[in-house]
Amino acid sequence: MTQGPDPTPIERWLARALGDDAPRHFGTGWISGVLAVFLGATALGAVIVLHFPDWLTSAELRARYPLPLVRTLIGLVIGFAFLASCLNLLLRRRKALGLAGLALTLAAVILGGTEVEIRGDFTRPYHFGLDWFLLNLLVFALVFVPLERAFPLHPGQRTLRAGWTTDLAYFFVSHVGIQLLAFLSLWPAAALTPWLGLGQVATRIASQPVWLQVLELMLLTDLVQYWVHRAFHRLPRLWRFHAIHHSSREMDWLAGSRLHLVDVVVTRALVVVPAFVLGFAEPALYAWLIVIALHAVFNHVNLRFRLRFLEHWLVTPRFHHWHHAVTPPDRNFAVHFPWLDRLFGTHYLPEGRWPEELGIRGHPVPDGFGAQFVYPLRRG
């Protein structure tokens, strides 16, 4: 693997403020310090959500939350953040991470902790999905970070690699702005559904078992997304937006979040048209959304698993890492089923090998969320 990118300015600032030159292996207090800051920030964010649920919770999820369980989970996060902070203060010579984690945890407790009274104007038409962001970040980080540390494809790659703050910004925007993204992505399907008049077809499709509908959704949407994805690579105006995703030079569970908003909206808008027009049942749609979210994260992970028994039938990290390889370009466009690339002549998966260099030749895309957002809009 070639030399990775340089840290962004905010990453350099965080390294100076919170880091040191001491060892970072298990038992030095570094892991507990990072965990303290992560859990402390998550706990503080969750308490803020409890204070403003009408503004900061997704309307689709709000009524489904088991509130006693949510309060218990927040209490556990606060407790583990406090313990991790104390462990860092005991083990590490420089206490910046532990003190920062302790400050975030105490702020969460002072603001009410798990006892915040739920109130607000729940008739508001607009909201931000801070709850969705925190829930996904907590689950994905606690699942994939330990796996990537235990079974890394590239052992020298750090969890807080160069560019992690940029990808975290993409992760934040895509989750907090879930209402706006859903509206922009669904309006073509909403406009076409009544005009096509596929009521009888929709009724038959919705009456099928949920597992069969999910499989059909995966097949149908992957076929559409294959050609949308290929167009983003072949058409220069579209490629400038999709190049943002390919600017990642190191892969992990967070790298898949690096997607320009135009790329996200256009791709989703075209992919969900057949899913909604054909009338798949709501449980199948929700299950399909969970599958594609998990699969997208999994395909970018820094894990050395080969999964030979799946490689011919299901997209795996090795297959998708070759899609991000500098050489050869424009391969492996499928999201779920690699046999689509074999069918259309774009399959590339050399036996037993992983790509040596990821990204775009010459690395033309700038670093940082703001610079990357305006990059496709600039002339030239």
Image (cartoon, rainbow, N blue to C red):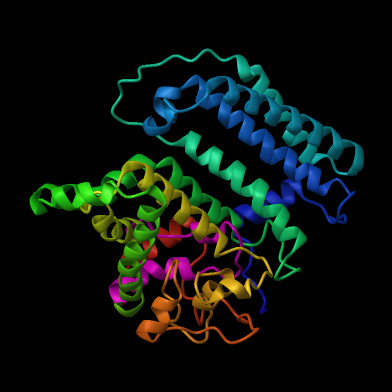
Decide which of 138, 112 is in the foreground and name it.
138
Residue lying at 60% horizontally and 43% vertically, measured from the top left: 139
Give the number of marks.
0
Q: Is residue 230 left or right of residue 85?
A: left
Above/below status of 338 relative to 329 = above
Measuring from the top left, give residue 60's x and y in whole percent: 38, 33
The image quarter containing residue 231 is: bottom left
Relative placement, left or right, of 140 versus 375 is: right
Q: Position of residue 31 (x, y in %)?
A: 79, 48
Q: Is residue 368 visible?
A: no
Q: Is residue 130 above or below residue 27?
A: above
Q: Nearer the viewer, residue 59 or 36?
A: 59
Q: Quadrant of residue 75?
A: top right
Quarter in which the C terminus is drawn? bottom left
Span of residues in magenta: 236-262
Q: Nearer the viewer, residue 236 or 80?
A: 80
Residue 12 lies, in percent from the top left, at 67, 56
Task: Give the residue drawn at x 48%, y 38%.
Answer: 132
Q: Would residue 203 be visible to someone looking at this image? A: yes
Quadrant of the drawing holding the N terminus: bottom right
Q: Is residue 86 magenta?
A: no
Q: Could you tell me which residue is drawn at 44 percent across and 81 percent down?
A: 331
Tell me if residue 119 comes above or below residue 154 in the rendering: above
Report the residue at 73% width, 35% height from top.
101
Residue in the foreground of this view, choosing between 102 and 19: 102
Left or right: where does residue 360 sit relative to residue 24? left
- Does the magenta portion include 252? yes
**Measured from the top left, where is residue 125 in percent x and y?**
28, 28
Which quadrant holds residue 339?
bottom left
